């Protein structure tokens, strides 16, 4: 595996890390078009030469296999899981977009639970150094599969070995996408999916005609008559299509749901979950290049917990059903838009960390150890309830937040292409109502949200989410109101980009 990493590339990665200095946690600026490139490999030199010759709006695409070569700890579960099988391969997909006026961006979507800090901090500055594209124009996004390597397993030999394999490949696919730049036209559209994503927290009427409230499977929910609950998931799928001269079309789908079916049905298998099935069906049915970017799904699952509702547990079936909806949108709902210049803005928020449970830190630590020793959810819950600790997960979150500072940085990025299209990204798992509100007020006819991007800073419930107790509120890094702050900051950023056109 280590033969995949050339000596030159290792030197380049070290140089890139050294060049990545710290900065203000709070910053707000529209970034310049380029930074100084320092390519140190033939592939990087070729990519820079390609960028320097682009004279019209162009799009490039590349994909690389990132499936672990050995067994690894898997992310996305409260219990330890080690991979034994590969249900479907994992990939990293990079899309390079250049406006022909000196500005370029890279969007990369990775079949991992999130764009982990340890990967973003290692590779993103290196891509910037090698290509001259500012870091604020390089988006690393995780699809949020719960059946990929857990990059946050510290001091784990298998994960350290995997990162040595992964990181150079992420750099490589970015360079390949740049080299693939071809003149393109741009189309946007949306389509409504049907019964494929579901809110995890809802009111319902049971078989006795009684109103019930379902919070989550850890049994931590509380309910009162004044609580307001959103019961319908936003089913909208946004579509972006680039038709390219001399190359395959590139299609991007932006939807929202947890890819966690495989983790429960086949817990020892590596899998990209439904994004992988979606990609496979789209490329089989359309002969296109395809990429999936997950949206705000902090409270959304890909299957319902109400047994009378439609439940799809097979990743390939679910992906194929999404592909059928996407094809309907591509055939009937797309419109061409003027591309125009690429403009970007980045703001790094400092948001207060949720320290409301610090006073029971030592009890939470005790309960965390108890769960690690016994694995008994119910015993931990019963022991914790007198202290306001509702589950082993809640205990772990209290311990984690205790060790954090008073604030945490949240990087928000906005990228606009012309006057009609924009993307915003955050390193969080937002509730979907926040981006629904964003889409209602954005100055752009279409705005996509990419979650799990450029690091990770936890769950961001909306105001209604904080009205009841659930897994996401128990585990939130930040205090109530953070979601609305992020939403409003996005709107300010988009307004400034629109005004600058």
Image: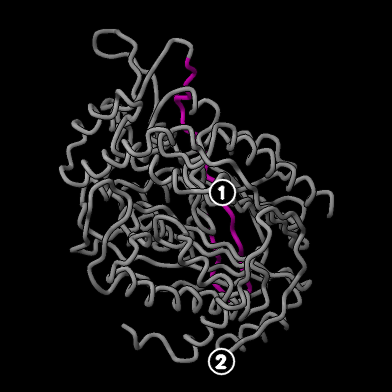
Q: Quadrant of residue 474?
A: top left
Q: Which residues are magenta?
A: 227-252
Q: Which mark is residue 94?
A: none
Q: Residue furthest left?
A: 374
Where in the figure is residue 42, as x and y percent of width and height? 56, 92
Determine if the magenta segment contains residue 52. Answer: no
- The residue tagged 2 is 42
280 to 202, vertically: above or below: below
Q: Residue 400, relative to residue 285: is it above or below?
A: above
For the point 44% across and 25% down, which residue is it? 231
| Pointer 1 local density, CA inside 10 Å: few below 14, some 14–19, many at least 20 | some
- Nearer mark to the viewer, of 2 and 1: 1
Give residue 155's position: percent from left, percent from top.
32, 67
Assess whether residue 233 is covered by the magenta stretch: yes
Is 181 or 73 nearer to us in this picture? 73
- Looking at the image, residue 482 sits to the left or right of residue 344; the answer is left
Inter-mark Cα distance, 2 to 1: 39 Å
Q: Are marks 2 and 1 in contact (CB under 8 Å)?
A: no
Rendering coords of residue 414 (x, y %): 67, 53
Give residue 363's position: percent from left, percent from top: 31, 35
Which residue is nearer to you in this view: 247 or 94?
94
Instruction: Indicate the secondary structure of the residue bearing disc 2.
Output: helix
Q: Quadrant of residue 470?
A: top left
| Residue farthest toward the right in the current orientation of the protein | 500
Q: Which residue in the protein does label 1 denote?
A: 408
* Residue count near mark 2 (Cα–Cα under 10 Å), binned few <14, some 14–19, many ≥20: few
């Amino acid at each position: 595996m280590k033969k995949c990493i050339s000596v030159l590339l290792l030197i380049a990665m070290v140089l890139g890390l050294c060049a990545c200095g710290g900065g203000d946690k709070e910053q707000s600026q529209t970034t310049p078009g380029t930074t100084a490139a320092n390519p140190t490999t033939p592939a990087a030199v070729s990519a820079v030469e390609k960028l320097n010759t682009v004279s019209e709006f162009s799009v490039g695409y590349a994909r690389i296999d990132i499936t672990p070569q050995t067994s690894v700890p898997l992310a996305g579960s409260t219990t330890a899981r080690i991979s034994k099988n590969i249900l479907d391969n994992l990939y990293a997909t990079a899309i390079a977009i250049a406006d022909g006026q000196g500005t370029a961006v890279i969007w990369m979507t990775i079949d991992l639970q999130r764009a982990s800090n340890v990967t973003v901090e290692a590779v993103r500055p290196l891509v910037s150094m090698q290509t001259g594209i500012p870091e604020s124009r390089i988006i690393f996004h995780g699809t949020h599969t719960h059946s990929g390597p857990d990059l946050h397993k510290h001091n784990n030999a298998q994960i350290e070995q995997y990162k040595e394999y992964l990181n150079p490949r992420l750099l490589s696919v970015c360079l390949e996408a740049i080299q693939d730049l071809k003149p393109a036209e741009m189309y946007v559209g949306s389509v409504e999916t049907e019964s494929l994503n579901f809110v995890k927290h809802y009111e319902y009427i049971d078989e006795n005609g009684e109103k019930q409230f379902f919070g989550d499977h850890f049994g931590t929910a509380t309910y009162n008559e004044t609580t307001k609950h959103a019961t319908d998931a936003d089913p909208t799928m946004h579509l972006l299509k680039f038709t390219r001269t001399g190359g395959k079309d590139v299609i991007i789908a932006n939807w929202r749901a947890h890819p966690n079916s495989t983790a429960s049905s086949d817990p020892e298998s590596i899998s990209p979950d439904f994004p992988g099935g979606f990609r496979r069906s789209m490329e089989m049915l359309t002969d296109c290049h395809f990429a999936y970017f997950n949206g705000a799904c902090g409270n959304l699952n890909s299957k319902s917990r109400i047994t009378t509702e439609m439940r799809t547990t097979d990743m390939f079936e679910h992906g194929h059903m999404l592909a059928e909806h996407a094809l309907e949108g591509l055939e009937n709902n797309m419109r061409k838009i003027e591309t125009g210049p690429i403009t970007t803005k980045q703001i790094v928020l400092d948001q207060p960390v949720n320290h409301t449970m610090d006073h029971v830190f030592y009890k939470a630590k005790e309960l965390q150890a108890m769960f690690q020793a016994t694995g008994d959810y119910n015993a931990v819950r019963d022991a914790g309830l007198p202290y306001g600790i509702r589950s082993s997960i809640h205990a772990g979150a209290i311990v984690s937040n205790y060790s954090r500072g008073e604030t945490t940085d949240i990087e928000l990025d906005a990228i606009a292409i012309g006057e009609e299209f924009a993307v915003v990204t955050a390193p969080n798992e937002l509730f979907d109502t926040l981006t629904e509100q964003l889409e209602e007020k954005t100055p752009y006819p279409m705005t996509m949200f990419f979650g799990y991007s450029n690091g990770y800073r936890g769950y961001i419930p909306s105001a209604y989410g904080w009205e009841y107790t659930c897994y996401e509120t128990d585990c939130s890094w930040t205090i109530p109101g953070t979601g609305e702050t992020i939403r409003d900051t996005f709107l300010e950023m988009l307004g400034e980009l629109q005004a600058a056109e």
